Image (spheres, coloured by chain):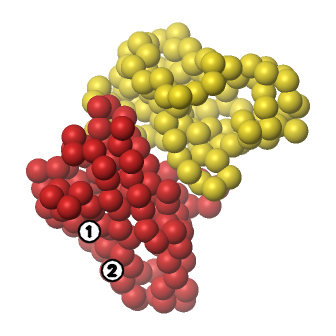
Amino acid sequence: GENVEQHPSTLSVQEGDSAVIKCTYSDSASNYFPWYKQELGKRPQLIIDIRSNVGEKKDQRIAVTLNKTAKHFSLHITETQPEDSAVYFCAGLAFQKLVFGTGTRLLVSP
Amino acid sequence: DTAVSQTPKYLVTQMGNDKSIKCEQNLGHDTMYWYKQDSKKFLKIMFSYNNKELIINETVPNRFSPKSPDKAHLNLHINSLELGDSAVYFCASNPGTEGAGEQYFGPGTRLTVT
């Protein structure tokens, strides 16, 4: 089955810096890769997603890149703000099942 | 006009008890899920139902039994609760049948077993 690894587990940046979170997946059948943001005590919410026929997708300050050959995908957040502080999860979808990475706790200091 | 709702929000109970968590979605989605998030924040799928039919059943103890009376509701019943069942349980729904697209999560139920 699918296995998704996520790095780093924690990431501290200064406000205005960029943040990059990386994930690798194992199942070549995976064809959909979402990223979820979970604020403390809240539910996970989708922030961006990418399908396997696309290499990059951007939405304002966030972007996701996908390298199918290497089986890895990354989340890029530019001009970070304190409200970006949260736990971020990557995920891969294979055979109707979404498998989540282990999460990255992002802390943006003012 | 809550999209995915769960009750209760908090549940504190003793080992050995039986408890249920209820989930409802008013989005008209075909697929609903139960996820477990443990103390380390690992988020893992437990079950998935599509239009009342079980389609994913992960390696979950059979003390956990989901029930979907209709496609808008997915409940989770847990028998003989154990300390290790303490976690936050999230219900979610998705418009498709393949799992792609946004999964709309409920607010979560924090279960504490003492």
Whether residue B66 is situated above or below residue A97 in the rendered picture: above
Of the numbered discs in the image, which one, if any, rests on residue A78?
A: 2
- SS at circle 2: loop
- In the rendered image, residue A71, in percent from the top left (x then y), is placed at 24, 57
Q: Residue at x 30, y 49 (%)?
A: A26
What residue did someone put label 1 on?
A63
Label whose residue precedes the other's in the sequence (2 or 1): 1
Q: Residue furthest left?
A: A53
Asked if the residues shown at circle 2 and circle 1 are in contact, with their CB atoms under 8 angstroms apart, the answer is: yes
Of the numbered discs in the image, which one, if any, rests on residue B33?
A: none
Q: Residues within 10 Å of mark 1 (few under 14, many from 20)?
A: some
Amino acid found under the numbered disc labelled 2: Thr
Whether residue A73 is situated above or below residue B41 in the rendered picture: below
- In the rendered image, residue A29, in percent from the top left (x then y), is placed at 22, 40
Q: Is residue B86 visible?
A: yes
The number of numbered discs placed on residues in the rendered structure image is: 2
Left or right placement of residue A31 versus residue A104 in this view: left
Whether residue A68 is situated above or below residue B23 in the rendered picture: below
Q: Residue at x 39, y 79 (%)?
A: A19
Question: Color used for chain A?
Answer: red
Whether residue A42 is situated above or below residue B82 in the rendered picture: below
- In the rendered image, residue B55, in percent from the top left (x then y), is placed at 39, 19
Q: Residues within 10 Å of mark 2 (few under 14, many from 20)?
A: some
Q: Residue at x 56, y 14 (%)?
A: B67
Q: Residue at x 49, y 36 (%)?
A: B45
